[in-house]
Image (spheres, helix red, strand yellow):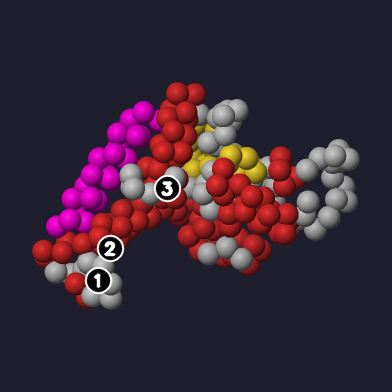
Amino acid sequence: MVPVPTPFDGEDGIDVPVKFDRRRATVVAFDARDWEPPEAVVIDTNVIAETMLPDEPEYASCKAVLGQLVESGTVVVFNRLLELELWEVVYEHALRRAVPGRDRRLRRFDRDVRSGPAVALARAQALWNELLDDLTWERVEIREVADAVPDLMRAYGLQSYDAVHAATLLASGVTDMVTRDAGFAVLMPEDAMLHTTRRRLSRTRARRRDACGG
């Protein structure tokens, strides 16, 4: 059973330095010049997915952080769900290019439409396998954390898929998470040190302040 912490509700019983800024100290940018990879991280799908889509705005930052994780020997923990979400993101991205507009919902089943997304998916699978060859990694199965998902949804308002990644973080004993999703800022700072991009830094820190205090 994955323990679900009680959302932060004050400073009682916590020894916090007078000038300690929980919001800034527990949300940092992985594309900052002075960023150093932790010994272990849990990684979110959206970081990996961005590296599969060269035309996306944070492609370079996400590609670079994966290179740093490889070089540093950081243990990268991820849930099996990441792979399923990754295939969905890549396939849908290619499908939107092939069939823009409302016709996509029905035309996705056409053989001539599927060919482009199928190629993109195969490429993503190959890139993912190459990345796994380079990374030091641990994979957590969905079944290992599934029981904790409803509790995390109730405690923090997370969507079920995000709750799977949050449960993976809590179950692994790792406290560093590499993500582009500001929604994980609702997790207690003591449990989730968030590493995001510079363009998302202010938004993520603001979410942490509102959810967890200063």
Estimate how packed mark 3 is, as few (under 14), some (14 to 19) or many (20 or more) residues with alpha carbons within 10 Å. few
Which residue is identified by label 1? 104
Are the two marked residues, 3 and 2, in contact with CB atoms closer than 8 angstroms? no
Residue 135 rendering spot, x and y as whole percentages: 40, 30
Kindly check if marks 2 and 1 are in contact, taking CB atoms under 8 A apart as contact. yes
- Residue at (57%, 29%) from the top-left corner? 33
Q: At 49% from the left edge and 43% from the top edge, which residue is drawn?
A: 43
Which amino acid does the dot numbered 1 rest on? Arg
Q: Amino acid at mark 2?
A: Arg
Q: Circle 3 sits on which residue?
A: 57
Q: Is residue 124 magenta?
A: yes
Which amino acid type is shown beneath numbered disc 3?
Answer: Pro
What whole-number distance in Å separates the C-alpha atoms at marks 1 and 3? 24 Å
Drawn side of residue 128 relative to residue 112, left or right: right
State the SS at label 1: helix
Disc 2 to disc 1, C-alpha distance? 7 Å
Give the x, y percent position of residue 180. 51, 49
- Give the percent coordinates (x, y) of residue 176: 59, 39
Question: Residue 52, which numbered label?
Answer: none
Residue 180 sits above or below residue 130 on the image:
below
Numbered badge on residue 96: 2
User: Left or right of 188: which side holds 129?
Assistant: left
The residue shown at (25%, 40%) is 126
> Which is closer to the viewer, label 3 or label 2?
3
Front residue of 181 and 191: 181
Q: Residue furthest left?
A: 112
Q: Secondary structure at mark 2?
A: helix
Give the magenta part as a residue range.
115-141
Query: Dot 1, how many residues are within 10 Å of its Cα: few (below 14), some (14-19), or many (20+)?
Result: some
Q: Residue at x 26, y 57 (%)?
A: 94
Task: State the CA–CA distance, disc 3 to disc 2.
Answer: 17 Å
**Quadrant position of residue 25:** top right
